[in-house]
Amino acid sequence: MPLLYTAIGVILLLILIMGFKLNTFFSLIIVSFVVALLLGIPPENIVASIESGLGGTLGHIGLIFGLGAMLGKLIADAGGAHRIAMTLINKFGEKQIQWAVVIASFIVGITLFYEVAFVLLIPIIFTIAKELNISIIKLGLPMSATLLATHSFLPPHPGATAVASEYGADIGMVLIIGILIAIPTVIIAGVLYPRIVERFMPGIFSPNRKVESIGEQKQFELEDTPGFGISVFTAIFPVILITLGSAIDMIQKTVGFEDNSFVVFMRFIGNASTSIVISLIFAIYTMGIARKIPIKTMMNSCSQAINVLGMLLLIIGGGGALKQVLIDGGVGDYIAKLFEDTSISPILLAWTVAALLRIALGSGTVATLSTAGLVIPILSQTPDVNLVLVTLATGAGSCMASHVNDAAFWMVKEYMGMSLKETFATYSVISTITSIVGLGFIMLLDLFI
């Protein structure tokens, strides 16, 4: 019954948004109440569950999302995004620009959280699309697919890192083999599939799509923009900081030395939230002060970035509220019971459980961590299983079928100006392909290693 109630909630949400044209955030809250009642959560606990989910989601990404949007807007308004976009266009050409986007997204996505990488890259993607007079969706979908794969498969992302530790897998090997799996998976899900969609549903890729979440973009002459090197360095500065923090952590775990002042400091600046704060300060200097742009002008850009995020943040929080209701209602526990005393292959079991939890709960990280607890007892019974591949299978399952209870689903929808139907036809399918193709490559590797 919990899975049935979850399905009823999703259907009701679609009816409210697409049929009755209700505000998305309002619809998410209504559905959260209805699903909570169906799942048997005591009425006196429902509001607390919804508030916990909304606050927990925004508490996790609010600072990163808000400051990341400011950073992206500063780079865009200073002309840095324009410089990066024009350089990529000139180097790769219009026909190969999707590959440029995939490569840039892969580099940025290895260390940055999905949300941070998304808000940093979207102004550049928008600028490229505008210069070439093509749809932002044509470039946004490859970017989203790449970020999803790197976030799901690769350390130092929290899910992959935590589950590798739980299973006892070598994190370095998870990273190396994860990259080998992620590259062909991204090509299939993020490049080839959107081309198929464009052939059969060309209306989705209209270049005249209005995207309110990005806000107004300034026009620039190339000579008035900052240099390519400083623009790229400013954009990837959080990547550098987080990479340094992650590297110190990995070295410490490998070598086994104690914490000291340097390690604590590097871990502090390598934290995602801290790195964004430092990067924003750095951008104020490189994109503004160094180019004699008044502080007031830069702060206006920051204010504009936050103003257009208001409803989007609420929608993401509403998705978090629905996710928390599903967790508190015992949907995850019900799925766990389905796989008690199973004799299925640990790799396939890890993927299946993670996929079901992801579909039901919405959070890839929650699905990953919950799966570990169910799979570990099976691992003790199959000592010859490759723990690296089990880790990657868990990650592959955790990106299955992104839909209305996933914050990333709403980010993609709002930032690319798509309808619910279009987002299901594109991003939901892309996430499913990423999950299934990723599993396919993992099972293939299992035959040889």
Image (cartoon, rainbow, N blue to C red):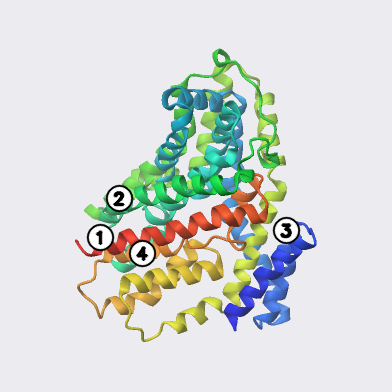
Q: How crowded is mark 2: few (under 14 residues within 10 Å), some or many (20 or more)?
A: few
The location of residue 75, given as percent across then percent down, is: 56, 29
- The picture quadrant where one finds residue 258 is bottom left
The secondary element bearing badge 4 is classed as helix
Front disc: 3 or 2: 2
- N-terminal of the two: label 4 or label 2? 2
Confirm or deny contact between disc 2 and disc 1 (CB under 8 A). yes
Q: How far apart, in angstroms, are the residues tagged by discs 1 and 4?
A: 11 Å
Q: How far apart, in angstroms, are the residues tagged by discs 4 and 2?
A: 14 Å
- N-terminal of the two: label 3 or label 2? 3
Which label is found at residue 25? 3
Which label is found at residue 180? 2
Tell me if 369 is positioned left or right of 13 in this view.
left
Q: How crowded is mark 1: few (under 14 residues within 10 Å), some or many (20 or more)?
A: few
User: Would you name the residue on which mark 1 appears?
Assistant: 445
Q: Residue at x 55, y 64 (%)?
A: 362
User: Would you name the residue on which mark 4 appears?
Assistant: 393
Q: How far apart, in angstroms, are the residues tagged by discs 2 and 1?
A: 10 Å
The secondary element bearing badge 1 is classed as helix
Residue 260: in sight, yes or no?
Answer: no
- Specify the quadrant that holds the C terminus: bottom left
- N-terminal of the two: label 2 or label 1? 2
Front disc: 3 or 4: 4
- Specify the quadrant that holds the N terminus: bottom right
The location of residue 211, given as percent across then percent down, is: 68, 40
The location of residue 406, given as percent across then percent down, is: 58, 60
* Nearer to us in this view, 68 or 333: 333
Q: Residue at x 57, y 78 (%)?
A: 3
